[in-house]
Image: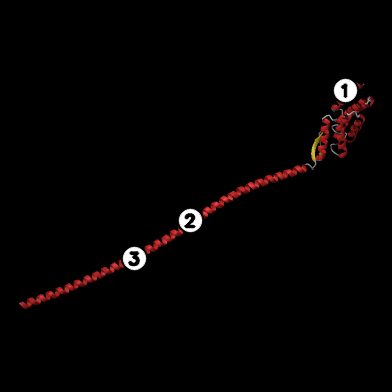
Amino acid sequence: MKRSALAAALAAASLFTATAQAALFEDDEARRAIIDLRQRVEQQRQGLADEVRRANDELRQENATLRRSVLDLQGQIEALRSELARLRGTDEQLARDLADTQRRQKDIVQGVEDRLRKFEPSQVNVDGKDIMVEPSEQRDFEAALGTFRRGDFVAAQVAFGEFLKRYPNSGYRPTALFWIGNAQYANKDYRGAIANFRLLLQQAPDHPRAPEAVLSIANCQIELKDNASARRTLDDLIKAYPQSEAAGAARERLARLR
């Protein structure tokens, strides 16, 4: 009985020991498994942290690159704005320069035309007829006529005489002959006046002043007391230019002479 109990006790003790050893073994395995798991988790956490750091580093680099690009772009935009402003200023200056140049060219052209006009022939209307005259020719004729109109008949006679010598083929010639004849009439040079009036009629019988020239011849003849010649001249005037105002004056003079 005592042996059986001892054997049972020993068996129980062996079983407890085995069980304890098994439990101890299982605890060690669990701890190792936990440690391994923790290590793997730590490794994964560390790897993830490294990836996050790398990603952050890359993002920082990309941000830095982007900021530099933005700054460069802003610099380029400012440079373009400055260049555009400069070009606008240049365009405005060029436009002003062009306008100034065009004005100067216009002034130069106008000045050249004005100077040429002083030397080129021009068309003028004298006694209802258009003629081409040189500038100096027109100037000298108008000066002589101005002298006559001022009543300085002696100077006018000289001026028209010089004009006819200087411009013997002038388109003004018939008119100049008419006015020199009138100046001579005013200076009582009746024979000289008749000669120039007749020269006018010989050279330009259809001139608008021709009827007046015939009437002036008759007036000179009357002043010379040559009434017979005056009557013939007045008759000729009425026949040659019947519709003229001079013909009407001739009829009145004839009535007084008869």
| Residue identified by numbered label 1 | 252
| Residue identified by numbered label 2 | 71
**Secondary element at image label 3:** helix
Considering the image in quadrants, where does the C terminus appear? Answer: top right
Q: Is residue 128 above or below residue 57?
A: above
Sequence-earlier tag: 1 or 2: 2
Q: Residue at x 9, y 77 (%)?
A: 7
Neighbor class of circle 3 (other Cα within 10 Å; few <14, some 14-19, many 20+) is few
Q: Is residue 56 left or right of residue 93?
A: left
**Secondary element at image label 1:** helix
Q: Residue furthest bottom?
A: 3
| Residue identified by numbered label 3 | 46
Q: Residue at x 34, y 65 (%)?
A: 46
Q: Residue at x 21, y 70 (%)?
A: 27
Residue flagged by tag 2: what amino acid is it? Leu
**Secondary element at image label 2:** helix
Whole-Å distance between the Cαs marked 3 and 1?
144 Å
Q: Is residue 20 above or below residue 139?
A: below
Whole-Å distance between the Cαs marked 3 and 2?
36 Å
